[in-house]
Each structure stands twice: as structure tokens, then as C-alpha cells.
Image (cartoon, helix red, strand yellow):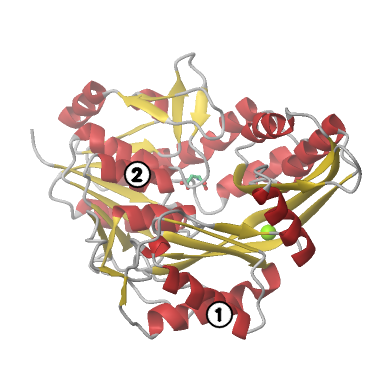
């Protein structure tokens, strides 16, 4: 069987007919057989979701999946018509038609299997197959979507299933940068980056790649290149195996995530099931808990619980918090959405306390007060006021990237989390940690 390339084009690359024809130019120059994966045109997915939200604050997820998946269906058909018009033997497929099987978690489904036979059969007959990204089908026949930005994951999964030699992710910037190039002119293009650094950057909120795409690429050892649709001859950024984290740890990127919230439940009458209920309700909308701390409440047998979280839809998030407040009988719930998480990412940096202390000192010297910070193997995350986010990114980028300085790793034994709404609550949190509640 001849060699196979997977090429994925994002929404901006297929935004209109002119751009679709430009994609045809790129595809027509490929020597290998191609699986082309596309996103919905431009902002179609936002537009479709907005329509649903104009009818209901909490639209049914099955119906939303059905709605959103139509965006990609438009792109595959138009691109295939354009390819055929240039004499290229091409055929389009929805996720279901090419055999992308997922679990049945609507709006954030995971791919469980891809029918290799149907890809091979399609490529035997055609030079190019065009597949709708972001979607699949559950074993009960329902259309599912993989979560926003999920077309990257479709592309890498198809590359793994097809045994492709390479997977190219075409986007509207030159590759992966040290920070968001659309907002910060000092952002530098990275020639290479490791799978794990890419995963951490994506999880930290950088719009580089869907985090699960980088995970899959690592697991199946897929050579992944992120490149610019509008400069198709530029090499872009190559994502490869992990670098040697033992020798030097260096900050590779600074990412921002504004979908963060800091929530305090005040004076909850004591009951053991509160956190279980939180976790159960949070599962409903893919709300991710970053940290939890508990302290004593203002009256006997009550407690206060602080959570830092990532949400996706504000209205649904508020509905869930309201439901939790009513269920647990808390006196109040304080919801602060004016927070942003700024993260430093680089292999091993989470184990280098001197990097963390320099980061905190840098922010403090500019009168930016971290609300909470935590570190893991390759990430140091700091929750700050949203109003400080640009300044913080610039300062940290200057400190760790624009003025590079190699730092030897000093390993510490465990990751760290510090955080609170105020110094009073910080004291309460540490009291409760001492008391073993946290
Ligand atoms: N169209 C979907 C979105 O906008 C999926 C994707 O583009 O990857 O999130
Ligand atoms: Mg926010």
C-alpha cells in the first residue's frame, strides 16, 4: 500500500470558497495518498452553539452534538466538490461513515476505535478522502462530538488508524509559539517541542492543539507538524519525543486560560457528601476542579469550601453552582470569574523551586498578587486577577524566555498548591490543612 499523509485544516483555513480552493492547491501537491480532516468553516461552530443558546440556557447535549456536527459536514462536502473540480479523485465521509467510534459522552466524547478497514477501502478507490473532524458515533448510533477544538484529535486518531507517515495540522499561524502570537508580539516560534510540553501547553489554555491530539500522537508515536496554511512551504513546528528533562529545565511557553473561576461556599452545614455531589454535578458539563481547600465555617458544625475550577459555559456553570448551594444549604456562594490562570510550561520545571520562586517574585514586584498557585511535573500555574493577565504574561515571558537563562533542576519531592480568597482565608486553609481536612 502506498504511503499516507494526514492533513488537517482548521476553521480559518476553510473559512470561505477562496480558502477552500487554496486548500485544494496544498492537497494537489501531495505525493502520498491523503486523509484530509477539516473543521467547520470559520466561526460556524460558535454560530450554531449560539443559536441553541438563544432557545435554551441549558440545551440538551445530544441535540447540541447533532447541531454542531453539521458544521464539519458542510466543509467536507464543499472541499470534496472543489477537489473533484480539479480532477482529483476524492470522496467525503462523516465521522460515522468512516467508522470513528466513540463513547457516549455527548459534547466531550472520546474515540474508542476507528475502523481501519474502511479507511483502507476508501483509499484504495480514491487518492484523497475528506473526513469531518470533531465528530464520531457512539455504539448506540448517536452522533457525538469530541469537545471544542477536537478536529485535531480526529486527525491524529485517523493518522494512527491509517498507519500514516505524517500528520500535518494546518492553521492560521506559523506553528507553536512561546506565547499567543496574536496578542503578544514578543512570542517566538518554536522549531520543535516535545509531546508532553505540547500537552501541558494545551491543557494550560494555549490554543496550540487539542490536548488529546498531542496525547494520542505521543501514544502512537505520530510525527506531528503544526504549520501555516498561508505559508505552506514553511516547516512550522515539529512535535517529537520528549527531551531529556534531567539536564536542563527551561520554560518553553507561557499560556493563559481565562475560563477559570474561584468559588467559595460559605458555611455549609456539615455533611460528608458535599464534595461527592460537587464532582457528580461537575461531570455534567465537563467542569474541571483544579484545587479544593476547606476551612472552618463561622458557626459550629459548618465549613467553608474553596474551589478553583475550569468551566466551559458560564450559564450552565452558574446553574450547577446554584443547584449545589441549594442542595448543601450553604449560607452563600461567592463566584469570581474575573480570574485567569497563567502557566509556565517546560519539561521538568515543576520540580525546580527556584523557577517557581522567581515567577512569584516577578509578579509581586509588579504588584500582581497570585491568588493561588500550583505546580506539577512540567507546569507552574498561577491564578491571578483577569485584569493583570496581559501584564503577567509579558513579565513572565521576558523573565524566562526573552532573556533565556538555563536553570539546573533541583528536584523537590511533591507538587505544591497554595491558594485562598484572602490572607484570612489563606490562614483558614492552612489551619484546616494542619487539621488534615484538606
Ligand atoms: N469546529 C469545532 C470547533 O470549532 C472543532 C474544531 O474546529 O476542531 O471547536
Ligand atoms: Mg475568568
Which residue occupies the foreground of this view, 329 or 296? 296
Which residue occupies the foreground of this view, 399 or 5? 399
In the rendered view of the protein, which quadrant contains the N terminus? top left
Q: What residue is drawn where x is 19% and y is 27%?
A: 120
Q: Badge 1, how many Cα within 10 Å: few under 14, some, many 20+?
A: some
Which residue occupies the foreground of this view, 353 or 235? 353
Q: Is residue 36 left or right of residue 371?
A: left
Q: Residue 226 location in percent, x, y?
A: 31, 59
Q: Is residue 172 left or right of residue 286?
A: left
- Secondary structure beneath disc 2? helix
Q: Is residue 56 left or right of residue 105?
A: right
Q: Is residue 431 above or below residue 162?
A: below
The answer to which quarter of the image holds residue 233 is bottom left
Q: What residue is drawn where x is 37% and y is 51%?
A: 9
Q: Is residue 30 left or right of residue 1?
A: right
- Secondary structure beneath disc 1? helix
Asked if marks 2 and 1 touch (Cβ < 8 Å), the reply is no
Q: Residue furthest front?
A: 435
Q: Residue 242 location in percent, x, y?
A: 24, 55
Residue 361's mark?
1
Q: Residue 24 location in percent, x, y?
A: 30, 52
Residue at mark 2 to residue at mark 1: CA–CA distance: 33 Å
Residue at mark 2: 215
The answer to which quarter of the image holds residue 89 is top left
Which residue occupies the foreground of this view, 346 or 10? 346
Q: Residue furthest left?
A: 1
Q: What residue is drawn where x is 21% and y is 50%?
A: 223
State whether label 1 is within 8 Å of ligand 2: no
From this viewpoint, is residue 209 visible? yes
The answer to which quarter of the image holds residue 339 is bottom right
Amino acid at each position: 500500500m502506498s504511503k499516507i499523509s494526514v492533513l488537517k485544516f482548521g476553521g480559518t483555513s476553510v473559512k470561505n470558497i477562496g480558502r477552500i480552493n487554496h486548500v485544494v492547491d496544498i492537497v494537489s501537491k501531495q505525493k502520498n495518498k491523503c486523509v484530509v480532516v477539516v473543521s467547520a468553516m470559520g466561526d460556524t461552530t460558535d454560530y450554531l452553539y449560539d443559536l441553541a443558546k438563544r432557545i435554551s440556557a441549558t440545551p440538551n447535549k445530544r441535540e447540541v452534538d447533532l447541531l454542531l456536527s453539521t458544521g464539519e459536514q458542510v466543509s467536507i462536502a464543499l472541499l470534496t466538490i472543489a477537489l473533484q473540480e480539479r480532477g482529483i479523485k476524492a470522496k467525503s465521509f462523516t465521522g460515522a461513515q468512516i467508522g470513528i467510534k466513540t463513547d457516549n459522552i455527548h459534547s466531550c466524547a472520546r474515540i474508542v476505535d476507528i475502523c481501519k478497514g474502511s479507511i483502507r477501502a476508501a483509499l484504495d478507490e480514491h487518492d484523497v478522502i475528506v473526513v469531518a473532524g470533531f465528530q464520531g458515533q457512539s455504539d448506540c448510533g448517536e452522533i457525538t462530538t469530541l469537545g471544542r477544538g477536537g478536529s485535531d484529535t480526529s486527525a491524529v486518531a485517523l493518522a494512527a488508524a491509517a498507519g500514516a507517515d505524517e500528520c500535518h495540522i494546518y492553521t492560521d499561524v506559523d506553528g507553536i509559539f512561546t506565547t499567543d502570537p496574536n496578542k503578544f508580539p514578543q512570542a517566538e516560534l518554536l522549531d520543535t517541542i516535545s509531546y508532553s510540553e505540547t500537552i501541558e501547553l494545551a491543557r494550560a489554555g494555549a490554543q496550540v492543539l487539542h490536548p488529546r491530539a498531542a496525547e494520542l500522537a505521543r501514544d502512537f508515536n505520530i510525527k506531528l507538524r503544526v504549520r501555516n496554511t498561508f505559508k505552506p512551504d514553511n516547516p512550522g513546528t515539529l512535535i517529537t519525543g520528549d527531551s531529556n528533562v534531567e539536564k536542563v529545565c527551561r520554560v518553553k511557553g507561557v499560556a493563559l486560560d481565562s475560563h477559570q473561576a474561584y468559588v467559595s461556599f460559605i458555611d455549609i452545614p456539615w455533611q460528608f457528601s458535599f464534595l461527592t455531589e460537587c464532582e457528580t454535578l461537575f461531570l455534567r458539563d465537563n467542569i474541571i476542579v483544579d484545587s479544593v481547600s476547606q476551612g472552618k465555617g463561622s458557626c459550629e458544625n459548618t465549613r467553608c469550601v474553596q474551589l478553583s475550577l475550569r468551566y466551559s459555559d458560564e450559564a450552565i456553570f452558574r446553574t450547577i453552582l446554584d443547584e449545589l448551594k441549594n442542595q448543601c444549604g450553604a449560607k452563600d456562594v461567592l463566584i469570581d470569574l474575573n480570574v485567569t490562570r497563567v502557566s509556565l510550561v517546560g519539561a521538568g520545571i515543576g520540580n525546580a523551586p527556584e523557577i517557581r520562586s522567581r515567577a512569584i517574585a516577578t509578579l509581586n514586584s509588579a504588584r500582581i498578587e497570585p491568588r493561588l498557585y500550583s505546580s506539577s511535573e512540567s507546569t507552574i500555574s498561577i491564578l491571578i486577577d483577569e485584569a493583570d493577565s496581559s501584564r503577567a504574561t509579558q513579565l513572565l515571558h521576558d523573565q524566562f524566555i526573552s532573556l533565556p537563562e538555563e536553570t539546573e533542576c533541583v528536584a523537590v519531592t511533591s507538587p505544591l498548591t497554595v491558594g485562598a480568597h484572602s490572607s484570612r482565608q489563606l490562614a483558614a486553609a492552612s489551619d484546616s490543612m494542619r487539621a488534615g481536612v484538606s
